[in-house]
Image: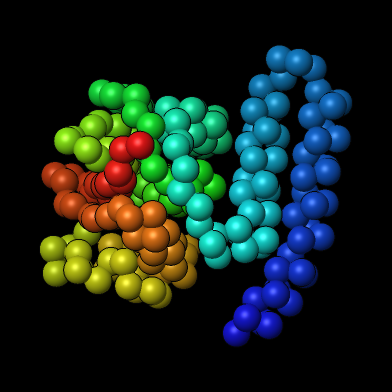
Amino acid sequence: MTEDFDRLAHQMRNPVMVIRTLAKLMAKSLAERDPNRPLLAAIDRECRRLDSLLDGDFADLVCTNVDLSELIANLLPSFQVLAERQGIQFSTQFLDQPHVQADERALAEVLANLLDNAFKYTKSQVTLSVKTEMNTCKISICDDGSGIAETELARIFDPYYRGSEVHGVPGQGLGLAIARDLVVAMDGTLIAQNLSPGSCFIVTLPLS
């Protein structure tokens, strides 16, 4: 399995590099205020994210003091562009601005994964909120989509499991399983809750 992944990762690196290079060349040819520049910047960020996954950067996590506000600020531009293109209301609520004990790259991947998921299933809005409780920080990512059947909540983080509400949305059923494993490796928890309407995924991590 490891050899298969290494072979696949090797084959994917060149196309990713080509995409990044083309995006940078296109950006250089655009005026400073061209509305397409944010799209190209988002492509570059997502390619860097894929590079991290292909390099296996999450094999050995190192938890340090992470400025959560700064980490989220670096994630937002890609999803703000996506929200504008899809006509989705995307908002953030920072009740606190904490520092957490986490692996910075792994946490960025977890939040990007959960936001990807929310944007896939939402109808009109996605909310990311941050607050502290006692010695922990809670990061909630909520949408107003179809939600998750109560009978499926216990299985939603199982590898390859996809709920009954997917309705043709593409995916392999691995994103949530990977996100949960990364959070647990950082001494945190990841849970799913139903809303009316929609669903909410809550990451809890220790404060620094």
Quarter of the N terminus within the rendering: bottom right
Seen in the picture, residue 39 relative to 94 is either above or below; the reply is below
Left or right side of 54 for 191: left
| Quadrant of the rendering where the C terminus is positioned | top left
The percent coordinates of residue 59 (x first, y second) are 55, 65
Instruction: Judge by depth and name the residue closer to the eye, 197 or 116.
Output: 116
Instruction: Name the residue rendered at 54%, 47% in the picture.
Output: 105
Report the number of discs: 0
User: Please, which colouring scheme is shown?
Assistant: rainbow
| Vertical placement of residue 69 versus 106, above or below | above
Residue 165 place in picture, x, y as percent: 28, 62
Task: Determine which quarter of the picture holds residue 127.
Answer: top left
Residue 187 x %, y %: 33, 55
Residue 35 figure quarter: top right
- Give x and y (percent) for residue 70: 48, 28
Rendered position, 46 above or below 164? above
Residue at 26% in and 23% down: 95
Residue 25 in view (yes/no): yes
Of 199 and 50, nearer the camera is: 50
Quick check: 47 left or right of 162?
right
What's the residue at 81%, 23% (across, down)? 30
Specify whether residue 83 is in view. Answer: no
- From what the image shows, is residue 34 above or below residue 186? above
Which of 34/64 is in front?
Answer: 64
Quick one: 78 or 102, which is closer to the camera?
102
- Relative horizontal placement of residue 84, taking residue 28 as reference (left or right): left
